[in-house]
Image (cartoon, helix red, strand yellow):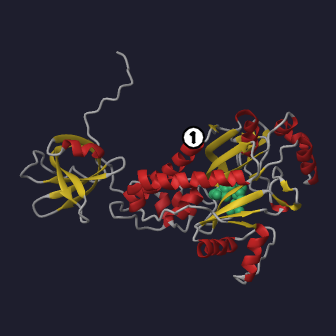
């Protein structure tokens, strides 16, 4: 026998139903819902991306429905494709069941009702039963949409000449500093889980000029907040030969425009199912950090507790300001204080108290941090020493600078945060398939 790689299928996908109108087809899926009417029944079949309405009636079904036909049975249904109309008048196909072959039987009925429009239980229960609750069409649409975001990021950057890379997640040092690094015993030696691909994506700028990575990163967040996970998907890029850090912000605006367009066109069903308002991006307003602080104090009469960073409430107010003043769902804040940015950030030569860095806020939530990086060897070593770091420990990282690096910069965009605010969700866990937080590592 030989395996050829040819995909043979005797079943038909819903997308091809138009070609099969009034013909007999076979479809496979899971019996999502059975609704008994007086002399017929609706059998809703859940397939990879759609639910297909099938109709059972003794008058045209050879199959006789018995008690063995249950919700969550895997099934092969043979029947006639007939055209009908939905409530809003658009065309919809259904299948008049001739035969059902049951391929599997659940041992028990689902612990949570998944056949309603949405899963109606608290978040914690929803997460406890994730393998089951994600079968609900609205719930699973979130992660189909998330696929679209990643796909848009990948497609756009690939077209712009970026190379996709994968950096190691077991590392000799944490890149982002702070206390939220996971320590790991590595054959008796202490190593760390990657907080970001920072050091490696920078190294690859001297190799490929433009690189990106979509991968998990790990942060030991000791607090339980609605916007922090201990493992999240970071969409990172890093680009060389920039004229200024505006190039990075422009690339991000381009990526976001592309993603939103892709969601509108190729993820239309999910967007409608989730009632998502896709943001219109024409241009994104930019404010300097200190300008933003002044607006907060003057316009909003806010008393900041920290003049070096924003708290979540300040981010929310800046989101409101962007909407009101510029009709924009996004706003870039630039020139963050040097004290609050990591060691690889380039200080502003005009005022070294501040940096050539930025955050992007989406509907009042930070979704990106980025900026220009130090590329000169002596400047980087000097900055490390000033921050009390030992450059010798970073010798492999500093090879980039020592042996020559182009001016460069990049950013990290949190996939779950972006998804969360697209959904209008209050908790980032809603936008995480299997979240890991301080209280949860299962399922
Ligand atoms: P915050 O101030 O909100 O804690 P941060 O400034 O520490 O975030 P960065 O190191 O700038 O985070 O990470 C870049 C991006 O990664 C953030 O803008 C955000 O989208 C995302 N991100 C950071 N930490 C988390 C986390 N714990 N859970 C989910 N997403 C995160
Ligand atoms: Mg940040």
Q: Which residue is mark 1?
A: 159
View extreme (left): residue: 59
Q: Is residue 79 shown above or below 135?
A: above
Q: Is residue 244 shown above or below 8?
A: below
View extreme (top): residue: 1
Residue 71 is left or right of residue 286, and the answer is left
Residue 355 at x, y = what percent? 82, 58
Residue drawn at x 70%, y 60% as measured from the top left: 359
In which quadrant is the N terminus drawn? top left
Ligand 2 resides in the quarter of the picture at bottom right
Residue drawn at x 55%, y 55% as measured from the top left: 257
| Crowd band around label 1 with a 10 angstrom C-alpha radius: few (<14), some (14–19), many (20+) | few
Residue 328 at x, y = what percent? 58, 68
Look at the image and tell me whether residue 199 can be seen.
yes
Look at the image and tell me whether residue 441 can be seen.
no
Residue 289 is left or right of residue 380, and the answer is left
Residue drawn at x 46%, y 54% as measured from the top left: 263
Near-viewer residue (146 or 434): 146
Near-viewer residue (308 or 58): 308
């Amino acid at each position: 026998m030989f395996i050829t790689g040819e995909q043979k299928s005797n079943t038909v996908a819903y997308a091809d139903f138009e070609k099969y109108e009034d013909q007999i087809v076979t479809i496979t899926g899971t019996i999502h819902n059975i609704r008994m009417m007086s002399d017929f029944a609706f059998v809703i079949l859940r397939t990879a991306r759609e639910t297909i309405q099938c109709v059972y009636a003794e008058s045209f079904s050879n199959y006789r429905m018995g008690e063995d036909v249950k919700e969550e049975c895997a099934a092969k249904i043979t029947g006639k494709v007939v055209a009908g109309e939905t409530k809003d008048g658009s065309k919809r196909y259904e299948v008049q069941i001739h035969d059902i072959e049951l391929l599997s039987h659940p041992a028990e009925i689902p612990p949570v009702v998944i056949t309603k429009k949405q899963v109606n239980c608290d978040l914690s229960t929803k997460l406890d039963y994730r393998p089951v609750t994600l079968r609900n069409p609205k719930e699973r649409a979130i992660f189909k949409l998330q696929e679209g975001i990643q796909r848009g990021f990948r497609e756009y950057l690939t077209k712009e000449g970026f190379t996709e890379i994968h950096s190691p997640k077991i590392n000799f040092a944490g890149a982002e500093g702070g206390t939220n690094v996971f320590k790991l015993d590595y054959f008796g030696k202490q190593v760390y889980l990657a907080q970001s691909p920072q050091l490696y994506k920078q190294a690859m700028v001297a190799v490929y000029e433009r690189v990106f990575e979509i991968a998990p990163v790990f942060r030991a967040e000791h607090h339980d907040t609605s916007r922090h996970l201990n493992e999240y998907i970071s969409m990172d890029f890093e680009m060389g030969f920039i004229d200024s850090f505006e190039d990075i912000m422009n690339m991000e605006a381009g990526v976001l425009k592309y993603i939103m367009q892709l969601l509108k066109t190729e993820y239309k069903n999910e967007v409608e199912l989730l009632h998502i308002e896709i943001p219109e991006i024409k241009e994104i307003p930019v404010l300097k950090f200190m300008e933003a602080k002044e607006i907060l104090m003057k316009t909003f009469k806010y008393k900041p507790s920290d003049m070096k960073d924003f708290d979540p409430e300040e981010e929310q107010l800046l989101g409101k300001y962007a909407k009101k003043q510029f009709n924009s769902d996004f706003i870039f804040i630039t020139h963050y204080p040097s004290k609050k940015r990591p060691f690889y950030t380039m200080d502003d030569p005009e005022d070294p108290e501040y940096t050539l860095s930025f955050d992007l806020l989406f509907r009042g939530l930070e979704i990106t941090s980025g900026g220009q990086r130090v590329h000169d060897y002596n400047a980087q070593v000097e900055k490390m020493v000033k921050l009390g770091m030992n450059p010798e420990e970073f010798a492999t990282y500093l090879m980039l600078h020592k042996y020559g690096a182009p001016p460069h910069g990049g950013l990290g965009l949190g996939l779950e945060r972006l998804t969360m605010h697209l959904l209008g969700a209050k908790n980032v866990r809603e936008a995480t398939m299997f979240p890991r937080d301080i209280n949860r590592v299962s399922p």
